[in-house]
Image (tube, coloured by chain):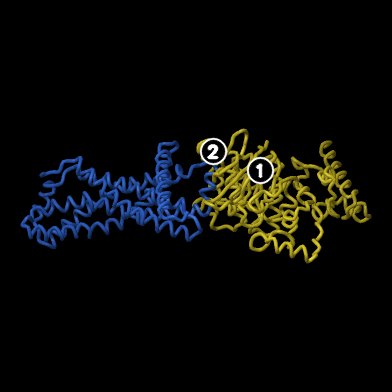
Amino acid sequence: MGVEVQIEGLTKSFGRQNIWADVSFTLPAGEISVLLGPSGTGKSVFLKTLVGLLKPEQGHIMIQGRDLTRLSERELYEVRKLFGVLFQDGALFGSMDLYDNVAFPLREHTRKSESEVRRIVMEKLDLVGLAGDEHKLPGQISGGMRKRAGLARALVLEPEIILFDEPDSGLDPVRTTLLNHLIVDLNQQTGATFLIVTHDINTARTVPDNIGLIYRRHLAMFGPREMLLSSQEPVVRQFLNAQRQGPIGMAEEKDASELEAEAASGQELPPLPPIPLQMQPLNGEPRPAERPPGEWCRRNGVVPPPGSFAPAGGFTTPADWPRLQDGTVHGGADPRADTVVLERDRAARDWRHDG
Amino acid sequence: MANPVSGALRHSGSFFAYCLDALRATPRRPFQVREMIQQAWFVSSVSILPTALVAIPFGAVIALQLGTLTSQLGAQSYTGAASVLAVVREAGPIVTALLIAGAGGSAICADLGARKIREELDAMEVLGIDPIQRLVVPRVVACMIVAVLLNGLVNVVGVSGGYFFNVVMQGGTPGAYLASFQALGQIQDLVIGEIKALVFGMMAALVASYKGMTAKGGPKGVGDAVNQSVVISFMLLFALNFVITSIYFQIVPQKGT
């Protein structure tokens, strides 16, 4: 389940304008990765290159031993069946209603009977909460609904790799959270590889297993979530924490003199905010690529910012409440905090296995 | 980059490559019959009425011009022959093509352009479906069929218009007009007229769909694409018409020569 995607030395330009150069990283199979970057750094171009809609000048994209950049048009159409892509606005076919939109890939690629198509389509529409809206046209529904319908269509062929182009743009915070939960749940249920392109740091902090950041026409960093969230690298730090101080300016990058002035002014960089816990699937099962919170930091001798991995917000269970009050669990840099979480998780898992 | 010469060359090159892609995708299964019928219906529904309305005055103008000219030369009995020849050989295919390009082509271009900027075409490719095979080929075939059929309509309407104006307005002899039909014209003229219509219909649809599928820059880009597609297909049509006519005169012997 899930397919690994290796990207090596990828370079793309439009005419003389270089978009990004020498991008190399591996999307681990079955994990959720997020690709971040300031607006206009070619994140969407990267996504289109990844599915072969745009040809890079250099580099390779290896999927199941095949190089996507070297394939003929016909082979490309075959490989693309591994992909499900959610475009920014859903990219639904305007002339068809939602049902036909979701049924379209099934009718084109499979010889399923109409009743089977109906079963699958209704199942996917139900999954994204659009059951009952199947006979509406894309023009008659809101942007959030279009996005969810686009997701249903992307899922219908049971892809191994699912790409999201800004799933959170134009959605309210509640819908964003719901969509993020849907992503985490889908990852757990299907085991597919996920890549989310976004600039929403809330999503980036809680949803993925890995984070990458594109900046100044190259990949600044790609690695496990905790590595980037505890990173002191100026760009990563500024972007992931939405800070004013750092190399990213309003227009483009800040130039050297501005940076010097900023350093000379002696402004203290605001401290790193605590690393939140990963979003968990709603059914309580662990994520496919789940690692204990803080493991990466411990193994690499990095001290996470104070208050990290505290069971806060929606991540507490009623069982934690009395302990929160008597201080066994609290939001400090207390190592016991994540121990308690681990114990809780383990207990929950054991319980499920017994049952 | 901004060199207009290299820009024009690049565009013609990519248009040619696009035509080859479309040609290669034509025999590929499954052929989209449903889409083709819908498109043929759509193109004919937007072009039948204007074509007929253009063909009547067109045939009339030819008849009027020839009527005065032939009476000055004392060759009234050949009015019918000349006007049939003009309508079937030239006016029919050209009127058909202009209407197909202007009414059908602009609609196809706008439709595909809107799909392009809404990323529908990208989505289709990602779903493993070739938009050229799925959308362009049925449209091109539909336009070709409709062009051939419309050409027949133009011929009939144009010749009837010519007849009406010559006989009723200019007092020509009905019998002479009809009897002279075959004096100059021959069956090959009808065939070449239909071949022209077929080629023009194909060209108009190819240009329109190419321009639509390469539209960029939001809604304004779609507007520009439609505008360019109409202008380019008109120019190509007249150039092609000249080429086909020259070849025709070289290979088909004419009556009375």
Residue A119 is marked as none
Q: Which of B107 and B12 is in front in this view?
A: B12
Per the image, the residue denoted by label 1 is A24
Identify residue type, mark 2.
Answer: Leu
Q: In this rendering, would A336 be left or right of A287?
A: right
Chain drawn blue in the picture: B
Residue at coordinates 20% horizontally, 52% vertically from top-left? B87
Where is residue A101? Give x, y as percent.
Answer: 54, 48
Where is residue A234? Give x, y as percent.
75, 55
Measuring 46% from the left and 57% from the top, which residue is drawn there?
B222
In the drawing, does residue A238 fall left or right of residue B200? right
Q: Is residue A131 above or below residue B169?
A: above
Q: What element carries label 2?
A: helix
Q: Which residue lies furthest to the right in this view?
A: A326
* 2 or 1: mark nearer the eye: 1
Residue ID at (73%, 49%) = A207
Q: Can residue A119 be seen in this view?
A: no
Task: Give the mark nearer the N terminus: 2 vs 1.
Answer: 1
Residue farthest top in this picture: A65
Q: Where is residue A100 in the image (x, y as percent from the top left)?
A: 53, 47
Task: Please give the chain letter of the residue carrying mark 1.
Answer: A
Viewed as shown, does residue A243 lie left or right of B91? right
The chain containing the residue under callout 2 comes to: A
Q: Classify the position of the C terminus of chain B by image quarter.
A: top left
Label disc, if present, on residue A76 of the rendered structure: 2
Q: Which residue ends up furthest to the left in the rendered image?
A: B74
Residue A52, image quadrant: top right
Compute the Cα span from label 2 to label 1. Answer: 21 Å
- Give how far across and how far down residue A16 sits, in percent: 54, 52
Chain A visual colour: yellow
What secondary structure is marked by label 1? Answer: strand
Q: Specify the amino acid type for callout 1.
A: Ser
